[in-house]
Image (cartoon, grey):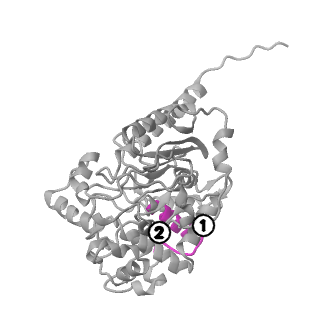
Amino acid sequence: MISRSRSDRLASEPGKRSGLEAPAGVQGVVEPGFKGVKRQFLKILKREPRGGGALCIYHHGRCVVDLQGGVRNAAFEPWAPETLVLSYSTGKGVLASLLHILVDQGVLDYEDRVSDHWPDFAQNGKESITVRHLLCHEAGLYRIGDLVESAGDMLDWDRMVSLLARSEPVHPPGADHGYHGLSYGWLIGELLQRATGWPLDRLVCRYISDPLGLNDFFFGLPPSEDARRADLVSGRVDPNSVETSRLAMRLGLSGSSAVHASQSKDDLRAALWPQGMENFDLNAPALRRAVMPSFNGMFTARGLARLYSALAEGGALDGVRLLSPSAIGRATEIQNQGPGRVLPQPMDWRLGYHGIPSARGDGEAAFGHFGLGGSGALADPRRRLSLAFVINTGVTGSLVDSRMIRLMQSAFQSVDRMERHECDLSGRHLPELESTG
């Protein structure tokens, strides 16, 4: 996705802020209260010496952590603030945010039938599917492996849109939920284009990138941006590396029955691993040029953190309003709970965002979207916090990456510690001043 506007303001901000220090071993800055997050980031980079990544955190609308480290390719070029990397499903949150902006402006409504905007979609039992069904993964259109002859078909936008328009849902819309791991991007992307008459790249520029002064969101990387790109260390994905049992065990949520777990495994493969997926070279020019919004979006940590900071701040950042507070409230209401037809663990789907898993139970207000390769972004309106992490060291065997979780928990603890300290200070009794008169 081509964003044509760029601001150097954000790049210059960290050096202008007081109270920041550059940690050893990485580039960038971090405020003193977030040193624990810095330590987690350094540990991650130390364990992955062949690659690199970036972390950016906003708190109360201010950038408080802005770190980059490691290398972005086999030539050992260092990771820079403007480095872009393929971030898998992290792009779903960007698409959802764009759709919410258009709903807030009256272009769409969550209860619209998709076929109201995309007439060809009204085939084979899809007539009653709504925008809401697409956003919360209740449309029953996740088995992409049943539609394509090979994964190579996914490089062709028009072909994928046509196949999905002719497809038949696995279940009646709204009767169940199943993670639309790949199909989500074409479904939401084509809906947006049909509703507005604008191509997807221009929509992202107009409603997200340009208002926030960014050049950090791409679905289909143009050649002009290749110099910023990080290669993935593991350029191919092995379907056997992702098992539903491992996903559940990583989160301690393996409460599914054996029958449900078996069905989830079959659905997972159909949703994420069509025939020939293992032959995809994720670093090849053909793949990075293709528009596959659920899979190959390229982002910077700074851009993602800035977008999610606006969401954490009630829809506005630095005087720029993307969404109304009421729109964010509607977008983040939980739509379904419990294990789905594809993933064996509850995701607490909002409208395009998932809940944030936390063993401590302290992330109930947070929402966002993580990606298979380790990247992800979230907003926590209660803490007025956003966090974005991008990395190029590949698939770890879990759709919810433990690296992202560790960084998130450290950020939560940092904010909670500062808030407790502020409460302690405000509660202290101050002696009365003696009169000198």
First along the sequence among labels 1 and 2: 1
Up-down relation of residue 17 to residue 266 (above or below): above
Among all residues in the image, which is located at the extreme left? 258
Q: How many numbered marks have been drawn onto this rendered protein structure?
A: 2
From the viewer's side, name the closer residue of 227 and 369: 227
Q: Is residue 105 magenta?
A: yes
Give the labeled residue for mark 1: 205
Label 2, secondary structure: give it.
helix
**For the point 48% across and 62% down, which residue is it?**
331
Among all residues in the image, which is located at the extreme front? 75
Up-down relation of residue 405 to residue 170 (above or below): above
Residue 341 visible within the image: no
Span colored in magenta: 92-111
Q: Residue 289 carries which label?
A: 2
Is residue 101 toward the left or the right of residue 334 in the image?
right
Up-down relation of residue 91 to residue 313 (above or below): below
How many neighbours does mark 1 have within 10 angstroms: few (below 14), some (14-19), or many (20 or more)?
Answer: many
Q: How far apart are marks 1 and 2 (CA)?
A: 17 Å
Q: Are marks 1 and 2 in contact (CB under 8 Å)?
A: no
